[in-house]
Image (spheres, rainbow, N blue to C red):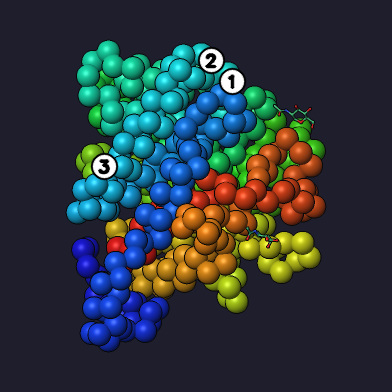
Amino acid sequence: MRAPVYVATLAAALFSVPTTAATAAAEKDCKPKYSQRMASSIIARGQGVMTGLGGASEALQAGVVQKAFTALSAHAAHDHASAATYEQYVRVSATSVIPFLSNALTDSLTYPMDRLSNGNALLALSTAKGSLYRIAADALRESINLNRRNSEGGLWYFVYPYWSYLDGMYSLAPFYTLYSLTRPGSNRTASLDDMLLQFDLLWRHTRHNATGLLSHGYDASRTAVWADPVTGASPYVWGRSLGWYTMALVDTIEILEKEKAPSKYKASLLDKFQNLMPAVLKAVDPRTGGWWQIVDQPGKAGNYIESSATAMFSYSLLKGARLGYLPKKLAPTAAIVGARAQKYLTDHFVVENADGTLGWNGTVAVCSLNSTASYEYYVGQPILYNSVLGSASYVLASVEVEKL
Ligand SMILES: *[C@@H]1O[C@H](CO)[C@@H](O)[C@H](O)[C@H]1NC(C)=O
Ligand SMILES: *[C@@H]1O[C@H](CO)[C@@H](O)[C@H](O)[C@H]1NC(C)=O
Ligand SMILES: *[C@@H]1O[C@H](CO)[C@@H](O)[C@H](O)[C@H]1NC(C)=O
Ligand SMILES: *[C@@H]1O[C@H](CO)[C@@H](O)[C@H](O)[C@H]1NC(C)=O
């Protein structure tokens, strides 16, 4: 599966094949890549470090930075100094969450499922028994048992009774899976079965038969103003929530494979991934190569190409193609569409600052189901400048492009 044949064709299609002289010039120029430039800019802004003062999404901001920088430091391993810088920042970020997330009960009651995005870095740093990293990782794992659930066993995303969101899967599944497969006495089979159940419940409740896309979430009690009377689903396909779900699938499949989990788990998630990604490909905006804030309402007044969702789909498509998680026939197209999206982001949402750092534009603030969940609600939420939920996802997508 390494170095598939389509890569050369792909590179030629995307970027006109450079001449030898141009290649030499580019090497001499030695410009840092966008993945590293954006990561250094995130560091320069001090983002992804939890302070307790940064609002409800701080734990998720830390978690997504840790994941992006972990991928980047592995990718940049030949450049020891840079790799060490990113690794060190993962440690700083993971250390910063310890005071907030080391109590399982508080975790389960006061933080959304997003808290679990910190778990993989905490596990990686948990080398010594009794270390604070291990205590925090164990508390996060225990908080899954304490998290409230609906009558079908679906985990509540946060404090809203019986509501489950796609968003939570990115934080839950890779951590739940890695913990179950690497920590002895972790109730492995029941935990992995539960992980699959969470993907499945969201799928069954939120999938639109016509498009194959998933809407933002569902209310198992069907009482929310937005809930479909039959399925409980919210009405719209919100780009970023679906992006979290597709990244959850591809990252969890990778862990299941690496840790040699029983094959039924990978088979189940691959089935979903291979069913969902063609729908995501179909929904791409043909003019820009990006995805809409409300994915299933292309071109409607007020709708726009949203940068965090575009980065997440770019990453999911490229990584899925690279690791062989997509059907052979689809992989080349997926990689081309993923790379084109990353280039659109670079050209339209990456901002060159005078001091050499990169800014990031076009990422929507929080969209919550604690709202009308109407079309007007989703397109009316503010755009945040330098949102790390978008820029860290762009680092992930850029690492994938640089691997081509
Ligand atoms: C293992 O997980 C199952 C399902 O979540 C639960 O019912 C059971 O009590 C757990 N057992 C232990 C020893 O934690
Ligand atoms: C969607 O498809 C599923 C599976 O084929 C079917 O059970 C369900 O009734 C369909 N729902 C709608 C609203 O058409
Ligand atoms: C961010 O995007 C908005 C909307 O396109 C634009 O008005 C604004 O100038 C951009 N900010 C920067 C710093 O480029
Ligand atoms: C949910 O929305 C209501 C109404 O806007 C607000 O008062 C409440 O604080 C929100 N709940 C949370 C947990 O944010």
Q: Of circles 2 and 3, which is in front?
A: 3
As measured in the structure, the alpha-carbon distance from the residue carrying label 2 to the one carrying label 1 is: 6 Å
Label 1 CA crowd tier, 10 Å (few <14, some 14–19, many 20+): few
Work out whether mark 2 precedes mark 3 in sequence or the reverse, and give the earlier one.
Answer: 3
> Under tag 2, what secondary structure?
helix
What's under tag 1, amino acid-wise? Thr
Q: Is mark 1 within 8 Å of ligand 4?
A: no
> Under tag 1, what secondary structure?
helix
Residue at the spot of label 3: 84
What's under tag 2, amino acid-wise? Thr
Image position of 95 with respect to 212: above or below: above
* Residue, far front: 355
Residue 110 is marked as 1
Residue 115 lies, in percent from the top left, at 49, 29
Look at 57% across and 47% down and name the residue there. 387
Residue 149 lies, in percent from the top left, at 57, 24
Residue at the spot of label 2: 106
Tag 2–tag 1 contact (CB < 8 Å): yes
What's under tag 3, amino acid-wise? Ala
Front residue of 86 and 283:
86
